[in-house]
Amino acid sequence: MTREEVFERVNEVFRDVFDDEDITVDEETTAADIDDWDSLEHINLVNAIEEEFDIKFSMGQIVEMKNVGEMVDIILSNLE
């Protein structure tokens, strides 16, 4: 799966979790960029991403994620 394909699927998950069809995330997107992205929504987002890609993040990976680009890096490493 390419990085672009992962981003397409991640964008869909963000739109579903935050119930906003206008959301488009990129490499630098952080929680500060999305109004409703709080700690509870972060848990929902992580769960939705894990389901979408059939992966499981470690606690260390979740803590490491500083932006969506890093999330995509971790997703790609889990898919290898």
Image (tube, grey):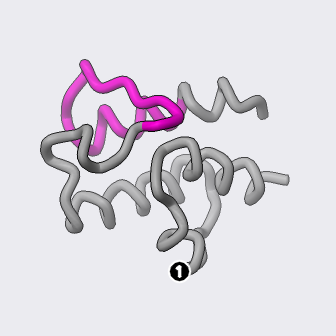
* Image coordinates for residue 2, horizontal then vertical, percent: 76, 29
Query: Which residue is pictured at 41% across the width and 30% down the height?
Result: 25
* Image coordinates for residue 40, horizontal then vertical, percent: 21, 66
Span shown in magenta: 9-28
Query: Which residue occupies the extreme top position in the image?
Result: 22
Q: Is residue 19 above or below residue 66?
A: above
* Mark 1 neighbour density, 10 Å: few (under 14) some (14–19) many (20 or more): few
Q: Report the quarter where the N terminus lies.
A: top right
For residue 20: magenta?
Answer: yes
Query: Which residue occupies the extreme left position in the image?
Result: 35
Query: Which residue is pictured at 66% across the width and 26% down the height?
Result: 5
Residue 20 left/right relative to 47: left
Q: Quadrant of residue 35?
A: top left
Look at mark 1 in the image and give the residue it sits on. Answer: 59
Mark 1: amino acid: Met
Tell how many labels.
1
Residue 47 left/right relative to 36: right
For residue 25: magenta?
Answer: yes
Query: Which residue is pictured at 31% across the width and 32% down the height?
Result: 15
- The local secondary structure at tag 1 comes to helix
Query: Which residue is pictured at 36% across the width and 55% down the height?
Result: 45
Foreground of the two, 62 or 49: 62
* Image coordinates for residue 66, horizontal then vertical, percent: 46, 57
Query: Which residue occupies the extreme right position in the image?
Result: 80
